[in-house]
Amino acid sequence: AGYHSGRNGSWRSRRDEPSIGGVNEQRTALVTGANKGIGYAIAAGLGALGHRVGVGARDDARREEAVARLRAEGVDAFGVPLDVTDDTSVAAAARQLEEAGHGLDVLVNNAGISGDHAPDWSQDPTALDLAEARRVVETNVFGVVRVTNALLPLLRRSASPRVVNISSSVASLTRQADPDAQSGPVMAVYAPTKSYLNALTVQYARQLAGTGVLVNAACPGLVATDFTGFQAPRTPEQGAVAALRLATLPDGGPSGGFFDDEGALPW
Ligand code: NDP
């Protein structure tokens, strides 16, 4: 509890939370890239909130190890082989979830890559490596489209379906254009993939308005994971908070928004 107690009033009270999925019904979630980092922490957090959690991961050994760790923590976890860049893999994952018969209530699109970058994270637009850019877009953007569209038929059958896209504050054009926020490296590949993901979040929310499917983007903050070389202030558990709030939004909650764990962020 307490996930919706943000300071600036953007988060709604959780008093009506038990209405999600019915009081006694266990909700089922899928988290992509859940074998480590923020995805693993989101899977653990959803498990602690009582969800049955599908651990989407492309590597068999890493996935099974994560499932075993989650089960040891008391999470009702199961493995879902999943490479978000591969149509066949995504179709197989959708089939597996369909055949398991538990439905799907929550999809967290977390799998993401930064691409090749200099040690300082810079990606120079005047020397853009298009092959690299395509690879990152394929994962961070089209991966989300591929997985979301394959799973939408299942999600639409949920009483309270939620889609959470893991974005980043670097996605914000307001921030990218703010001279005071331009001390970070120029990131001509990674940051625009997250801007694209944010824009897609809005388009999905518009398309799905009135269906009950709420689609939002979450910024985890700077989190110590493989992704950041473990050089970042926040723990994966802290990085999971915004996603957990959005995954458990009450019916009628926001859709098409961009949030961190304190509230709405500027586009
Ligand atoms: P990690 O590198 O620790 O985890 C990334 C996860 O994505 C891994 O499980 C990885 O699997 C998986 N993945 C990558 N490509 C694919 C694919 N094609 N199919 C399936 N899974 C895939 O990074 P984080 O936990 O830090 O990042 C998670 C998300 O959070 C990303 O979207 C990232 O952009 C975002 N983010 C992270 C921030 C941070 O500070 N860490 C800040 C803002 C956003 P594998 O182990 O097989 O490589």
Image: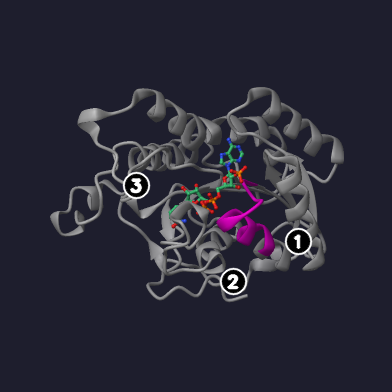
Looking at the image, residue 26 sits to the left or right of residue 48; the answer is right
- Mark drawn on residue 70: 1
From the viewer's side, name the closer residue of 7 and 147.
147
| Amino acid marked by disc 3 | Ala
User: Please, is residue 72 above or below residue 136 in the view?
Assistant: below
Residue 35 image position (x, y, % from top left)? 66, 51
From the viewer's side, name the closer residue of 49 and 23.
49
| Amino acid marked by disc 2 | Arg
Mark pair 2, 1: CA separation: 25 Å
Q: Residue at x 48, y 55 (%)?
A: 254
Q: Foreground mark, 1 or 3? A: 1
Task: Judge whether residue 122 is colored magenta.
Answer: no
Q: Is ligand 1 less than 8 Å from the beta carbon at label 1?
A: no
Secondary structure at badge 3 equals: helix
| Amino acid marked by disc 1 | Leu
Q: Residue at x 26, y 46 (%)?
A: 173
Labels 1 and 3 touching (C-beta < 8 A): no
Mark pair 3, 2: CA separation: 28 Å
- Mark drawn on residue 14: 2
